[in-house]
Amino acid sequence: MGWVLRLLARFRAIFSKSSLDEDLDAELIHHLELLTEENVRNGMTEKEARRQARITFGGVEKIRELHREARGITWLEHAFRDLGFSTRLLWKSKGFSFAVIATLAICIGLNTTVYSTLYRLVLEPLPFKDPERIVHIFNVPKSGVRSHSSSNTAQYLDFKRNADMFENIALSRMNIIHSRPERKTPLVVTPDFFELMGVEPILGRFFTDEEAQGHDEPFIVLTQTTWENEYASDPDIVGKARGERVIIGVAPRSLEVLDRRIDFFRPHSIRDNFGNNPRLGRSDLWGRLKPGVTREQAYTQLLEIEKRYHLENSSVEERTHFESIPRPFLLGKPNPYKARLLLLQGGALLVLLVGCINIVNLLLARAMRRCNELSLRHSFGAGKLPLIRLMLCECFLLSFCGALAGLALSWASIRFVNRYMTVIDPNEAPLQLGDALFVSTLTPALAITLIMSLVPFILLWKSGRIQKLDRNSRSSSTDKSARGFGNGLVVSQVAITFILLVGAGLLFRSFSNVLSVDPGFDQSSLVQGRMSMPFPDARSHERIGLRKKIVQTTLQIPGVEKACFLKSGSLVGTQHYTGRLVLRARQTETERDPLPILIMYVSSAFFDTMGIPITKGRSFYEGEDELDTFIVDEAFVETYLDGESALRTEMMTVRGSGLTPTTKVWPRVVGVAKRANFQGLQERDGIPIVYACCDQFTDRSWALVLRTQRSLDPLAREVRAELKELHPQLNWINPSSLDVSLDQLHLDRKGITLLSGVFAGLALVLSAVGIYGVLLYDVQQRQREIGIRSAIGASRGIVLKMILHQGLWKAGIGLGIGLLASIFLTRFLKDRLFDVTTLDPLTFSLAALFLLSVVLVASYLPARRAVRVDPIETLRAE
Amino acid sequence: MSKRKDLLQGTLDLLVLRVLETGPRHGYAIARRIEQISEDVLKVQQGSIYPSLHRLEDKALIESEWLVEDGKRPVKVYTLSKEGKAYLQAETESWQTFSAAVNTVLKNA
């Protein structure tokens, strides 16, 4: 306890310094008076008595100092004093302070933003109990092309009974009704789902098995968000009705990570209504592994169960094509962004590196300029530690301000990122500032700057310049090591900048290459939108009639030139069906390993409407059956037919399971269309497309594509009005211009290209500042030398050349190193490049040229200053 | 003058405590008392007892109090605390052991 009081007393002492000093003074004065009185009594004169008293007493000032030291935490006082002092000093050299703070702010802001995004989208662990044991089980076709199939109750029950590697197995299904966005979205889950995820209700309870018998049981569990937004966090919500259903509980927010669209939960039937049914369905199968069980082990067990099922239940023929393998995947974030974000993070870190180098360089130059001041302090008794304390204090102030500015910057840029978050992933909650993660990025940033701040000082101390108070050692060789270090910094800066420039250059060329790809169709005046025909009861052939009527009606609208429809919800901006194909000519081979294709079901008017030329054969006839004919694109001919004539090629699609079973007649190719890139221009070399005619399809949902010169909004209004007349429930959903949709497909490439350009630009500016700073410092230091040189006849040209030479020489070495590093590093960009090799000579040479010209300018400015040196002035100053 | 010796490091605290054991005193009185008792052998620069006093006060071995009498300057008076007494006793013993040991070595070696 004693030490606490003492500590408190000390703190009090710091802040009540003056009153304590008065106390001491009173005590000392009293002592001196008594001494003087005694001396007077011993017969001294008044004056002599006072003098002797002071001698006997000793130095008053020293005692005061000792007293203070014994009483307060002196270093804290010193820190305050140093802080005040540093603030004044930094304020005096505003240019320097601004440069350092701005550099820091940019680097910190950039890195925290990129890292926050990376963390949220990739690194953040899921908020469940032991998420590494939760797996998502998909049925992967044996001869798999990408597609993963979901599961059904039969498979779920089978696994639940027999797979003992799992602690728990559950099903879930999302019910999204796209046509009515106002409708709430339930996640339909089996009762064991919550236990599997390891969550507890925040109110009420979750479903019981009894409540999950039928298909539409009247129980629901709310998500926390719905509970908060719709029921204002009503604590008595349990037992209340919501429509025809009863609310039995509220689930914690963590479950919303799975999909933000979930509004509430409903029980998924745990009764097997499928009988002897294929195991594929529409529900997602989840499993929680027992502790210590690997995914590989679980996979082996599921495989065995699945094999036994197929042996017992399927005919041999069905099995050949039907078999798919249940495969557990680690529940993680589906991550298409990982590679891209890591790339960006790499770029941001390189910028940080350039920034750090710049700061060290600036600090070094400043420290050298302050050498005289520092050595003066040293000779007045400031030891190594106080000097370090002073430097640290300055850098702390700088990095603190830099970090603050960086925070502000990342606050702004995170808001910017959030604007695009819905484009990146509608499923993600917006990023937020102030996560614990923030501390984890800022702390190292501060630590790095503090360590960096010491480097210049240590260099100077080692070179012995501070210890010697020698005004004439200005351009002497003592600071050679410091200058060498500075040169090294500039070289590495140039090298890193070159790497970033090359990276940005390659990405930029790829982007422009992508944009110059021919989309293969006339995208300029096309509008697409989804159509949903709301007649569950209408007989299927009536739907065909209604669709025909809709198309005809829209064609009547003035300004609409052509119209067609297709099976998928939209043409651009959606994933089209990937399928597999067997060629009759190479049946055994292709049956074993079917050819991956993109299959598009389009109406007969499609090619005409889209402006896709048919290069061989014909387009679809109206009303043609999908089972009779195909049209393939040129990529198909090149990839699978070795450029041979495609017409009359017989082929058949493999449907999830096996060959289309309804017919024994092989459909034929009747035409070859020009390659069209609906999934983005970079898909030029993607999977070949096979078109089938969907005139006879009876689907309720399809996309209507119109060719028109009119602008979107009035057209959409008019189309909707016409549709309403046909049937009050018809609607044209999300009409969009194809141009815009196609552009959006390139948003991500555009974003990365833009950002890499920004990174390279920042690095370029920073290194230009670095080179400028170092050369300028050099010129200042060598003023006397330059003065003498010009006094003995060196022309301006020679001086200019001398300084320029210095800058270019460093840049040259940096360029060389950067070149070697780039040759190695650009391979990481490979997946992002389009029609550009990783060693594209044009990009490399342009980057080098650009960098060199910037260096030239950055060195010319200090060189000009050197030329202006007046020899007489300089020599007189000495 | 040659008889006067500088104080051994750290012993001043001990002397101050011993002086205060005889009763409360102010700084000047303490300094004078040390000089008198040691018959001016121990040279104490009078000012240096103040850091010592504050150190001891900081360790709670002594307590201080401002004494105000009418018409006079207030005087800061120091008193030995309970901890101070115990500390003084322990230190005195260890000092005696130490000096006895040194004496023995000096005599017999």
Image (spheres, coloured by chain):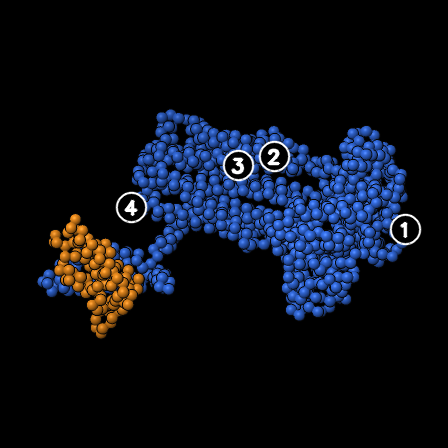
Chain colours: A blue, B orange
Q: Residues within 10 Å of mark 4 (few under 14, many from 20)?
A: few
Chain letter for mark 2: A
Disc nearer the start of the sequence (3/2): 3
Chain letter for mark 3: A
Q: Pointer 1: what residue?
A: A541
The answer to whether marks 4 and 3 sit on the same chain is: yes
Q: Nearer the viewer, residue A495 or A205?
A: A205
Chain letter for mark 4: A
Chain letter for mark 1: A
Q: Pointer 4: what residue?
A: A380
**Is the C terminus of chain A in the top left, top right, bottom left or bottom right quadrant?**
top left
Q: Give the amino acid at mark 2.
A: Arg
Q: Pointer 2: what residue?
A: A827
- Name the disc covering residue A496, or none: 3
> Label 4, label 2: how many angstroms apart (C-alpha)?
57 Å
> Label 1, label 2: how many angstroms apart (C-alpha)?
55 Å
Give the farthest residue toward the top.
A793
In front: label 1 or label 4: 1
Q: Is residue A587 visible?
A: yes
